[in-house]
Amino acid sequence: MDKLIVHGGATLRGSINISGSKNASLPILAASLLTAEPCIIRRVPDVSDTNYMIQILSAMGADVERSSGTVRITCADISDVAPYELVRRMRASICVMGPLLARKGRAVVSLPGGCVIGDRPVDLHLRGLEALGAKVEFEGGNIILTARDGLRGAEIDLCGTHGPTVLGTDNVMMAATLAEGITVIESAAAEPEVIDLADFLNAMGAKITGAGTRRIVIEGVRELRGVEHTVIPDRIEAGTFMAAAALAGDEVKLRRVCREHLKAITAAIEQSGHRVEFNEAGNTCTVFRGETFHGVDLVTAPYPGYPTDMQAQMTALLATTPGISVIKDTIFPQRFMHCAELKRMGADIKIDHGTAVVRGVAQLSAAPVMASDLRASAALVLAALTAKGDTEISRLYHIDRGYEHIDEKLLMLGAEVERVKD
Protein backbone atom coordinates (compact mmCIF):
# COMPACT_ATOMS: atom_id res chain seq x y z
CA MET A 1 0.00 0.00 0.00
CA ASP A 2 1.41 3.40 -1.00
CA LYS A 3 1.75 6.49 1.15
CA LEU A 4 2.75 10.02 0.25
CA ILE A 5 5.45 11.95 2.07
CA VAL A 6 5.12 15.72 1.70
CA HIS A 7 8.10 17.85 2.71
CA GLY A 8 6.48 21.14 3.69
CA GLY A 9 7.76 24.58 2.78
CA ALA A 10 8.29 24.46 -0.99
CA THR A 11 6.76 27.22 -3.12
CA LEU A 12 4.61 26.15 -6.05
CA ARG A 13 5.12 27.81 -9.43
CA GLY A 14 4.85 26.79 -13.07
CA SER A 15 2.04 25.21 -15.09
CA ILE A 16 0.22 21.90 -15.47
CA ASN A 17 -2.61 20.42 -17.56
CA ILE A 18 -5.86 19.52 -15.83
CA SER A 19 -7.11 16.03 -16.66
CA GLY A 20 -10.47 15.02 -18.07
CA SER A 21 -13.32 14.79 -15.58
CA LYS A 22 -13.58 11.56 -13.61
CA ASN A 23 -17.23 12.24 -12.76
CA ALA A 24 -18.07 12.83 -16.43
CA SER A 25 -16.04 9.87 -17.69
CA LEU A 26 -17.79 7.24 -15.57
CA PRO A 27 -21.36 7.64 -16.91
CA ILE A 28 -20.06 8.27 -20.44
CA LEU A 29 -18.14 4.98 -20.31
CA ALA A 30 -21.31 3.29 -19.05
CA ALA A 31 -23.35 4.89 -21.85
CA SER A 32 -21.31 2.95 -24.41
CA LEU A 33 -23.51 -0.02 -23.35
CA LEU A 34 -26.37 1.61 -25.27
CA THR A 35 -24.96 0.74 -28.71
CA ALA A 36 -23.28 -2.21 -30.42
CA GLU A 37 -21.11 0.18 -32.43
CA PRO A 38 -17.64 1.35 -31.33
CA CYS A 39 -17.36 4.46 -29.15
CA ILE A 40 -14.11 6.42 -28.82
CA ILE A 41 -13.80 8.52 -25.67
CA ARG A 42 -10.85 10.88 -25.24
CA ARG A 43 -9.26 12.43 -22.14
CA VAL A 44 -10.43 9.68 -19.82
CA PRO A 45 -8.26 10.17 -16.71
CA ASP A 46 -6.02 7.32 -15.59
CA VAL A 47 -7.50 6.91 -12.11
CA SER A 48 -8.66 3.80 -10.28
CA ASP A 49 -12.38 4.67 -10.60
CA THR A 50 -12.23 4.77 -14.42
CA ASN A 51 -10.07 1.64 -14.37
CA TYR A 52 -12.76 -0.17 -12.36
CA MET A 53 -15.47 0.98 -14.77
CA ILE A 54 -13.46 -0.32 -17.72
CA GLN A 55 -12.97 -3.63 -15.89
CA ILE A 56 -16.72 -3.86 -15.27
CA LEU A 57 -17.51 -3.27 -18.94
CA SER A 58 -14.88 -5.82 -19.99
CA ALA A 59 -16.26 -8.40 -17.56
CA MET A 60 -19.71 -7.87 -19.12
CA GLY A 61 -18.33 -8.71 -22.56
CA ALA A 62 -17.30 -5.32 -23.96
CA ASP A 63 -14.21 -5.13 -26.15
CA VAL A 64 -12.11 -2.34 -24.60
CA GLU A 65 -8.83 -0.81 -25.75
CA ARG A 66 -7.10 1.95 -23.79
CA SER A 67 -4.14 4.07 -24.83
CA SER A 68 -2.89 7.48 -23.62
CA GLY A 69 -6.20 8.71 -22.27
CA THR A 70 -8.27 7.40 -25.19
CA VAL A 71 -10.68 4.51 -24.63
CA ARG A 72 -12.29 2.58 -27.49
CA ILE A 73 -15.28 0.46 -26.44
CA THR A 74 -17.40 -1.90 -28.49
CA CYS A 75 -20.37 -3.47 -26.69
CA ALA A 76 -21.57 -5.81 -29.42
CA ASP A 77 -22.40 -8.81 -27.26
CA ILE A 78 -22.80 -8.04 -23.56
CA SER A 79 -24.11 -9.76 -20.46
CA ASP A 80 -26.89 -8.19 -18.39
CA VAL A 81 -25.02 -8.88 -15.13
CA ALA A 82 -22.47 -6.49 -13.59
CA PRO A 83 -20.10 -8.55 -11.39
CA TYR A 84 -20.17 -8.01 -7.63
CA GLU A 85 -16.40 -8.21 -7.13
CA LEU A 86 -15.92 -5.10 -9.26
CA VAL A 87 -19.13 -3.19 -8.53
CA ARG A 88 -18.53 -3.30 -4.75
CA ARG A 89 -15.31 -1.31 -5.18
CA MET A 90 -16.94 1.81 -6.59
CA ARG A 91 -20.30 3.43 -5.91
CA ALA A 92 -20.46 5.11 -9.34
CA SER A 93 -20.68 1.68 -10.98
CA ILE A 94 -24.42 1.91 -10.28
CA CYS A 95 -24.66 4.03 -13.46
CA VAL A 96 -24.45 0.88 -15.64
CA MET A 97 -27.99 0.10 -14.45
CA GLY A 98 -29.89 2.49 -16.74
CA PRO A 99 -28.12 1.76 -20.04
CA LEU A 100 -28.04 -1.99 -19.37
CA LEU A 101 -31.77 -2.06 -18.67
CA ALA A 102 -32.54 -0.03 -21.81
CA ARG A 103 -30.34 -2.15 -24.06
CA LYS A 104 -31.03 -5.64 -22.68
CA GLY A 105 -34.39 -5.31 -20.94
CA ARG A 106 -32.77 -6.67 -17.79
CA ALA A 107 -30.00 -5.54 -15.44
CA VAL A 108 -28.49 -7.31 -12.45
CA VAL A 109 -26.26 -4.98 -10.46
CA SER A 110 -24.85 -5.50 -6.97
CA LEU A 111 -25.66 -2.88 -4.37
CA PRO A 112 -22.54 -0.70 -4.58
CA GLY A 113 -19.93 0.19 -1.98
CA GLY A 114 -16.91 2.47 -2.17
CA CYS A 115 -18.06 5.42 -0.06
CA VAL A 116 -17.79 6.31 3.63
CA ILE A 117 -18.99 9.93 3.64
CA GLY A 118 -22.59 9.25 4.54
CA ASP A 119 -25.79 7.80 3.22
CA ARG A 120 -25.92 7.94 -0.58
CA PRO A 121 -28.98 5.79 -1.36
CA VAL A 122 -29.95 4.49 -4.77
CA ASP A 123 -33.68 4.77 -4.12
CA LEU A 124 -34.01 7.78 -6.44
CA HIS A 125 -32.36 5.82 -9.26
CA LEU A 126 -34.81 2.97 -8.75
CA ARG A 127 -37.81 5.27 -8.43
CA GLY A 128 -36.94 6.83 -11.78
CA LEU A 129 -36.41 3.51 -13.54
CA GLU A 130 -39.64 2.11 -12.06
CA ALA A 131 -41.50 5.11 -13.47
CA LEU A 132 -40.16 4.11 -16.90
CA GLY A 133 -41.72 0.66 -16.46
CA ALA A 134 -38.96 -1.38 -14.83
CA LYS A 135 -39.74 -4.03 -12.24
CA VAL A 136 -37.32 -3.86 -9.29
CA GLU A 137 -36.41 -6.84 -7.10
CA PHE A 138 -33.68 -7.50 -4.55
CA GLU A 139 -31.99 -10.86 -4.20
CA GLY A 140 -28.71 -11.90 -2.58
CA GLY A 141 -27.37 -8.35 -2.39
CA ASN A 142 -28.27 -7.68 -6.03
CA ILE A 143 -30.70 -5.26 -7.63
CA ILE A 144 -32.57 -7.04 -10.42
CA LEU A 145 -34.38 -4.80 -12.90
CA THR A 146 -36.53 -6.14 -15.72
CA ALA A 147 -38.51 -4.48 -18.50
CA ARG A 148 -39.65 -7.37 -20.68
CA ASP A 149 -41.92 -5.17 -22.78
CA GLY A 150 -39.45 -2.30 -22.99
CA LEU A 151 -39.38 1.06 -21.24
CA ARG A 152 -41.94 3.82 -21.71
CA GLY A 153 -41.56 7.55 -21.25
CA ALA A 154 -42.86 9.16 -18.07
CA GLU A 155 -42.70 12.31 -15.97
CA ILE A 156 -40.28 11.79 -13.08
CA ASP A 157 -39.30 14.02 -10.15
CA LEU A 158 -35.80 13.19 -8.89
CA CYS A 159 -35.63 15.61 -5.98
CA GLY A 160 -33.99 14.03 -2.94
CA THR A 161 -33.53 15.05 0.68
CA HIS A 162 -30.32 16.95 -0.08
CA GLY A 163 -31.19 18.11 -3.58
CA PRO A 164 -30.95 16.56 -7.06
CA THR A 165 -29.05 13.34 -7.68
CA VAL A 166 -26.35 13.51 -10.35
CA LEU A 167 -25.93 9.77 -10.95
CA GLY A 168 -29.70 9.28 -10.64
CA THR A 169 -30.24 11.89 -13.36
CA ASP A 170 -27.59 10.14 -15.47
CA ASN A 171 -29.17 6.71 -15.01
CA VAL A 172 -32.70 7.79 -15.88
CA MET A 173 -31.53 9.93 -18.81
CA MET A 174 -29.55 7.02 -20.29
CA ALA A 175 -32.44 4.58 -19.86
CA ALA A 176 -34.92 7.05 -21.37
CA THR A 177 -32.96 7.43 -24.61
CA LEU A 178 -34.27 4.04 -25.79
CA ALA A 179 -37.68 4.24 -24.07
CA GLU A 180 -40.86 4.59 -26.12
CA GLY A 181 -42.24 8.11 -26.01
CA ILE A 182 -41.17 11.20 -24.10
CA THR A 183 -39.58 11.30 -20.65
CA VAL A 184 -39.49 14.47 -18.54
CA ILE A 185 -37.07 14.61 -15.59
CA GLU A 186 -38.03 17.30 -13.08
CA SER A 187 -35.60 18.38 -10.32
CA ALA A 188 -32.77 17.11 -12.52
CA ALA A 189 -29.15 17.67 -11.58
CA ALA A 190 -27.65 20.56 -13.58
CA GLU A 191 -23.95 19.75 -13.14
CA PRO A 192 -21.57 20.13 -16.12
CA GLU A 193 -20.99 16.38 -15.99
CA VAL A 194 -24.70 15.81 -16.75
CA ILE A 195 -24.43 18.18 -19.72
CA ASP A 196 -21.36 16.30 -20.98
CA LEU A 197 -23.23 12.99 -20.81
CA ALA A 198 -26.20 14.53 -22.66
CA ASP A 199 -23.85 15.85 -25.36
CA PHE A 200 -22.37 12.35 -25.72
CA LEU A 201 -25.82 10.75 -25.96
CA ASN A 202 -27.07 13.35 -28.46
CA ALA A 203 -24.03 12.69 -30.62
CA MET A 204 -25.05 9.01 -30.53
CA GLY A 205 -28.47 9.97 -31.91
CA ALA A 206 -30.46 10.61 -28.73
CA LYS A 207 -32.93 13.50 -28.53
CA ILE A 208 -32.27 15.28 -25.24
CA THR A 209 -33.03 18.91 -24.43
CA GLY A 210 -32.71 20.91 -21.23
CA ALA A 211 -29.49 19.36 -19.86
CA GLY A 212 -27.96 21.87 -17.48
CA THR A 213 -31.40 22.95 -16.21
CA ARG A 214 -33.72 21.40 -13.63
CA ARG A 215 -35.99 20.03 -16.41
CA ILE A 216 -34.63 17.57 -18.95
CA VAL A 217 -36.77 16.22 -21.79
CA ILE A 218 -35.81 13.00 -23.59
CA GLU A 219 -37.59 11.78 -26.70
CA GLY A 220 -36.92 8.07 -27.07
CA VAL A 221 -35.31 6.69 -30.23
CA ARG A 222 -35.10 3.14 -31.61
CA GLU A 223 -31.32 2.83 -31.53
CA LEU A 224 -28.09 4.71 -30.91
CA ARG A 225 -24.84 4.70 -32.85
CA GLY A 226 -21.14 4.81 -32.04
CA VAL A 227 -19.45 8.19 -31.65
CA GLU A 228 -16.22 9.98 -30.75
CA HIS A 229 -16.21 12.33 -27.76
CA THR A 230 -13.76 14.35 -25.66
CA VAL A 231 -14.50 14.53 -21.92
CA ILE A 232 -14.75 17.95 -20.24
CA PRO A 233 -11.99 19.11 -17.83
CA ASP A 234 -12.19 17.99 -14.21
CA ARG A 235 -13.45 21.03 -12.31
CA ILE A 236 -12.69 19.45 -8.92
CA GLU A 237 -9.08 18.68 -9.85
CA ALA A 238 -8.79 22.25 -11.16
CA GLY A 239 -10.28 23.60 -7.94
CA THR A 240 -7.92 21.48 -5.86
CA PHE A 241 -4.87 22.89 -7.63
CA MET A 242 -6.33 26.41 -7.38
CA ALA A 243 -6.50 25.92 -3.61
CA ALA A 244 -2.95 24.49 -3.61
CA ALA A 245 -1.70 27.56 -5.48
CA ALA A 246 -3.47 29.90 -3.07
CA LEU A 247 -2.05 28.01 -0.11
CA ALA A 248 1.55 27.44 -1.19
CA GLY A 249 2.01 29.08 -4.58
CA ASP A 250 3.64 32.06 -6.18
CA GLU A 251 2.19 32.05 -9.69
CA VAL A 252 0.58 28.81 -10.86
CA LYS A 253 -0.99 28.33 -14.30
CA LEU A 254 -3.63 25.66 -14.93
CA ARG A 255 -4.35 24.71 -18.54
CA ARG A 256 -7.36 22.80 -19.93
CA VAL A 257 -9.88 24.25 -17.51
CA CYS A 258 -13.38 25.67 -18.06
CA ARG A 259 -14.01 29.08 -16.50
CA GLU A 260 -17.80 28.62 -16.54
CA HIS A 261 -17.56 25.45 -14.45
CA LEU A 262 -15.29 27.10 -11.86
CA LYS A 263 -17.30 30.21 -10.95
CA ALA A 264 -18.22 29.19 -7.39
CA ILE A 265 -14.73 27.85 -6.63
CA THR A 266 -13.06 30.94 -8.12
CA ALA A 267 -15.30 33.20 -6.02
CA ALA A 268 -14.34 31.37 -2.81
CA ILE A 269 -10.61 31.54 -3.61
CA GLU A 270 -10.89 35.27 -4.36
CA GLN A 271 -12.98 36.00 -1.27
CA SER A 272 -10.23 34.51 0.89
CA GLY A 273 -7.79 37.08 -0.52
CA HIS A 274 -6.16 35.48 -3.57
CA ARG A 275 -6.26 36.40 -7.25
CA VAL A 276 -7.41 34.27 -10.20
CA GLU A 277 -7.01 35.39 -13.81
CA PHE A 278 -8.44 33.56 -16.84
CA ASN A 279 -7.38 33.98 -20.44
CA GLU A 280 -9.93 35.26 -22.95
CA ALA A 281 -10.96 31.76 -24.02
CA GLY A 282 -11.53 30.74 -20.39
CA ASN A 283 -9.51 27.53 -20.76
CA THR A 284 -6.42 28.64 -18.80
CA CYS A 285 -6.23 30.31 -15.41
CA THR A 286 -3.38 31.67 -13.32
CA VAL A 287 -3.62 31.78 -9.53
CA PHE A 288 -1.62 34.33 -7.54
CA ARG A 289 -1.29 33.92 -3.78
CA GLY A 290 -2.61 37.02 -2.07
CA GLU A 291 -0.93 39.30 0.45
CA THR A 292 -3.84 39.82 2.84
CA PHE A 293 -6.16 36.93 3.68
CA HIS A 294 -9.70 36.69 5.03
CA GLY A 295 -11.91 34.04 6.55
CA VAL A 296 -14.96 33.17 4.45
CA ASP A 297 -18.39 31.63 4.94
CA LEU A 298 -19.20 28.76 2.59
CA VAL A 299 -22.34 26.70 2.11
CA THR A 300 -22.21 23.75 -0.26
CA ALA A 301 -25.08 23.44 -2.73
CA PRO A 302 -25.93 21.66 -5.98
CA TYR A 303 -24.37 23.23 -9.10
CA PRO A 304 -23.97 26.13 -9.74
CA GLY A 305 -23.43 26.46 -5.98
CA TYR A 306 -20.20 25.67 -4.16
CA PRO A 307 -19.46 21.94 -4.65
CA THR A 308 -19.35 19.54 -1.73
CA ASP A 309 -16.42 17.87 -3.51
CA MET A 310 -14.34 21.03 -2.84
CA GLN A 311 -15.36 21.47 0.80
CA ALA A 312 -12.42 19.55 2.31
CA GLN A 313 -9.80 21.28 0.14
CA MET A 314 -11.13 24.72 1.06
CA THR A 315 -11.10 23.72 4.73
CA ALA A 316 -7.38 22.97 4.38
CA LEU A 317 -6.76 26.39 2.82
CA LEU A 318 -8.78 28.19 5.51
CA ALA A 319 -6.99 26.32 8.33
CA THR A 320 -4.09 28.77 7.97
CA THR A 321 -6.12 31.77 6.79
CA PRO A 322 -6.39 34.46 9.52
CA GLY A 323 -9.84 34.98 11.00
CA ILE A 324 -12.87 32.75 11.40
CA SER A 325 -14.40 30.77 8.55
CA VAL A 326 -17.69 28.89 8.69
CA ILE A 327 -18.29 25.98 6.30
CA LYS A 328 -21.67 24.27 6.11
CA ASP A 329 -22.11 21.13 4.00
CA THR A 330 -25.78 20.75 3.09
CA ILE A 331 -25.15 17.85 0.69
CA PHE A 332 -23.21 15.47 2.97
CA PRO A 333 -23.36 16.82 6.54
CA GLN A 334 -21.08 14.00 7.77
CA ARG A 335 -18.32 14.90 5.32
CA PHE A 336 -15.87 16.32 7.85
CA MET A 337 -13.68 13.33 8.65
CA HIS A 338 -10.63 15.18 7.31
CA CYS A 339 -11.00 17.70 10.12
CA ALA A 340 -9.84 15.25 12.79
CA GLU A 341 -6.65 14.66 10.80
CA LEU A 342 -6.15 18.40 10.18
CA LYS A 343 -6.49 18.94 13.94
CA ARG A 344 -3.66 16.44 14.44
CA MET A 345 -1.58 18.87 12.37
CA GLY A 346 -2.56 21.78 14.62
CA ALA A 347 -5.69 23.14 12.92
CA ASP A 348 -8.35 24.79 15.09
CA ILE A 349 -11.65 23.37 13.83
CA LYS A 350 -14.92 22.68 15.62
CA ILE A 351 -17.65 20.55 14.01
CA ASP A 352 -21.32 20.87 14.89
CA HIS A 353 -24.21 19.34 12.93
CA GLY A 354 -22.74 19.58 9.45
CA THR A 355 -20.95 22.88 10.05
CA ALA A 356 -17.22 23.48 10.59
CA VAL A 357 -15.98 26.60 12.35
CA VAL A 358 -12.34 27.15 11.37
CA ARG A 359 -10.08 29.57 13.25
CA GLY A 360 -7.00 30.19 11.16
CA VAL A 361 -3.65 29.38 12.77
CA ALA A 362 -0.25 30.71 11.76
CA GLN A 363 1.14 27.34 10.62
CA LEU A 364 0.41 23.64 10.73
CA SER A 365 2.89 21.00 11.88
CA ALA A 366 3.66 17.74 10.12
CA ALA A 367 2.09 14.59 11.53
CA PRO A 368 1.26 11.08 10.34
CA VAL A 369 -2.28 11.32 8.94
CA MET A 370 -4.69 8.94 7.26
CA ALA A 371 -6.97 9.59 4.30
CA SER A 372 -10.60 8.55 4.79
CA ASP A 373 -12.04 9.37 1.37
CA LEU A 374 -11.07 10.88 -1.97
CA ARG A 375 -11.47 14.59 -1.25
CA ALA A 376 -10.31 14.29 2.38
CA SER A 377 -7.03 12.87 1.12
CA ALA A 378 -6.58 15.85 -1.21
CA ALA A 379 -7.18 18.20 1.72
CA LEU A 380 -4.41 16.51 3.71
CA VAL A 381 -1.97 16.88 0.81
CA LEU A 382 -2.80 20.60 0.58
CA ALA A 383 -2.37 21.13 4.30
CA ALA A 384 0.98 19.32 4.23
CA LEU A 385 2.38 21.65 1.55
CA THR A 386 2.97 24.45 4.08
CA ALA A 387 3.15 22.42 7.30
CA LYS A 388 6.41 22.49 9.22
CA GLY A 389 8.23 19.20 8.67
CA ASP A 390 7.46 16.03 6.73
CA THR A 391 3.88 14.79 6.63
CA GLU A 392 3.14 11.12 5.93
CA ILE A 393 -0.26 10.48 4.36
CA SER A 394 -1.35 6.84 4.36
CA ARG A 395 -4.20 5.10 2.48
CA LEU A 396 -3.15 6.86 -0.69
CA TYR A 397 -5.46 4.62 -2.71
CA HIS A 398 -8.25 7.05 -1.83
CA ILE A 399 -6.59 9.90 -3.73
CA ASP A 400 -5.76 7.60 -6.67
CA ARG A 401 -9.51 7.10 -7.16
CA GLY A 402 -9.93 10.58 -8.60
CA TYR A 403 -6.63 12.42 -9.16
CA GLU A 404 -4.49 11.48 -12.13
CA HIS A 405 -0.81 11.37 -11.08
CA ILE A 406 -1.26 14.05 -8.40
CA ASP A 407 2.25 13.49 -7.03
CA GLU A 408 3.79 13.98 -10.49
CA LYS A 409 1.82 17.18 -11.08
CA LEU A 410 2.87 18.57 -7.71
CA LEU A 411 6.50 17.76 -8.51
CA MET A 412 6.12 19.65 -11.80
CA LEU A 413 5.06 22.69 -9.78
CA GLY A 414 8.04 22.44 -7.45
CA ALA A 415 6.52 20.65 -4.47
CA GLU A 416 8.69 18.19 -2.57
CA VAL A 417 6.65 14.99 -2.45
CA GLU A 418 7.47 11.30 -2.77
CA ARG A 419 5.34 8.19 -3.08
CA VAL A 420 6.69 5.26 -1.06
CA LYS A 421 5.51 1.78 -0.11
CA ASP A 422 3.92 1.68 3.32
Image: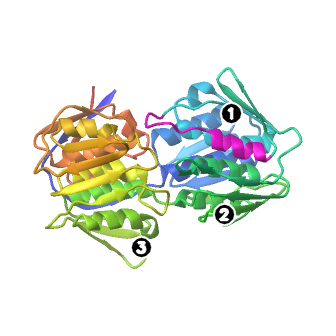
What amino acid is labelled 1 in the image?
Met
Query: Which of the 4 image quadrants contains residue 200?
Result: bottom right
| Residue at the extreme right of the image, as rendered | 149
Give the labeled residue for mark 3: 282
Between discs 3 and 1, the one toward the N terminus: 1
What amino acid is labelled 3 in the image?
Gly
Between discs 2 and 3, the one toward the N terminus: 2
Between discs 2 and 1, the one toward the N terminus: 1
- Image coordinates of residue 370 in percent, x first then y, are 28, 32
Q: Give the residues drawn in magenta, as a range.
A: 115-132
Q: What residue is at 62 percent from the left and 47 percent from the top?
A: 168
In this view, the mark in front (2 or 3)? 2
Q: Quadrant of the N terminus?
A: top left
Give the labeled residue for mark 1: 60
Query: Which of the 4 image quadrants contains residue 207?
Result: bottom right
In this view, the mark in front (3 or 1)? 3
Give the labeled residue for mark 2: 215
Query: Which of the 4 image quadrants contains residue 222?
Result: bottom right
Q: Nearer the viewer, residue 297 or 133?
A: 297
Secondary structure of residue under mark 2: strand
- Image coordinates of residue 56 in percent, x first then y, are 61, 34
Q: What residue is at 79 percent from the left and 52 percent from the top?
A: 178
